[in-house]
Amino acid sequence: MGAARMNLLVVDFGYHVLPEWFSPERIIEGLFMAEDAGFTIGWISDHFHPWFDGGAYCSFAWSILSATAERTSKIRLGTAVTAPILRYNPAIVAQAFATMDYLYPGRVILGLGTGEALNEVPAGCGWPSFRERLERLEEAVQLIRLLWRGGFVNFRGKYYRLRGAKLYTLSKTSIPIFIAASGQSTAYLAGKLGVGLITLAGLGMDWIRENVLRSYRRGLADAGQAQAKVSTVCEVICSYDEDEEKALNTCRPFAATLLPLIFRANVSDPREIEKYGNMIRDELIRERWIVSPKPEDHIERYSKLAELGFNHIEIVDISPDHRKFIKFYRESILPYFQQTR
């Protein structure tokens, strides 16, 4: 246990809310409670469409972040993740997050990714190849960083242009950038650009170790980046209730996200995605996500992720009752890891 406990010294926890799961006021309440419970980062998905249709919400992530920052005092807040490639012009992403950090300095995080069809296609943006989306993401990061430096910027890339652009309201601190990756190419890009990495526990431990983390570290090395200075985040989907079957039932609307096809293909209708979710076996949900009322099941999973080298665990709460979930973590999970600090 000695080596594992040494790794646990650098692990903290974030609370991830899904805008399709809760109404806006419930999201803000959950993030407020998460701050009080000891979560260090509040994450929110940046979606235009939800993963399912029946009973879904889908509020605008940036509005939620600002409203939450006004009602909290210390928890850091960020998107997991924003796709700055099609429906968002990266210059506008740069402006939005610079303004948020101006208002709430040191508390803003920008998570970026190659996007999903369910967000881009309904907004009229089409769905280009993965290669194009990856190239767009790389350009977008370069463009955002240029604007954050201040001054007038000209930029001519393959996909984006800036002509004498300037942000007149700059951030007060340096905003951390993270890139979400489930495969080798995006993980390598995150390392190459020297930004933090977000990946998914649902991919499986072997895939994460051999493909995602190895590619990320190779990108860091090729770019001459110091690995000790970057952050690695693992997203874990969790449903908690004393009644385990009740907790399992609330996983069903999101079950389609266990299919790699959903992230790659041009599938954007939540009604269709919901049907794919009905194909997923309960056994796979239990294997890839945490659906248990037992503290030891949660602690064991997070300890294994810490052993892989992750220093932040981002927990996506899809529990029947967010208040119960946060109380359970406050009393039974977070104290265990805090004792190892």
Image: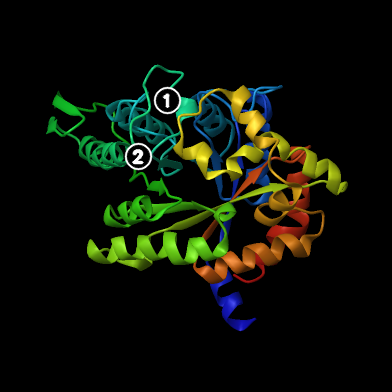
Residue type at mark 1? Glu
In the foreground, 167 or 239: 239
**Relative to 60, residue 139 above or below:** below
Q: Residues within 10 Å of mark 1 (few under 14, many from 20)?
A: many
Say few, some or many: other residues with alpha carbon within 10 Å of mark 2 (under 14 / 14 to 19 / 20 or more): some
In this orientation, which residue lies closer to the viewer: 58 or 73? 58
Q: Amino acid at mark 2?
A: Phe
CA gap between label 2 and label 1 equals: 13 Å
Instruction: Residue 322: give x, y in percent of width and height.
Output: 74, 39
Q: Which residue is mark 2?
A: 130
- Note whether residue 224 is visible: no
Q: Which residue corresponds to the image point at 54% horizontal and 72% vertical from the top-left?
A: 7
Query: Taking 14 as reference, is 297 above or below it?
Result: below
Residue 54 in view: yes
Instruction: Assign the N terminus to one quadrant of the image.
Output: bottom right
Q: Residue at x 42, y 44 (%)?
A: 106
- Looking at the image, the residue that sits furthest to the bottom is 2
Q: Where the C terminus falls, by quadrant?
A: bottom right
Question: Residue 327's x, y, as percent?
Answer: 77, 47
Q: Quadrant of residue 218?
A: bottom left
Return the disc, 2 or 1, that comes first in the chain's sequence: 1
In the picture, the disc for residue 120 is 1
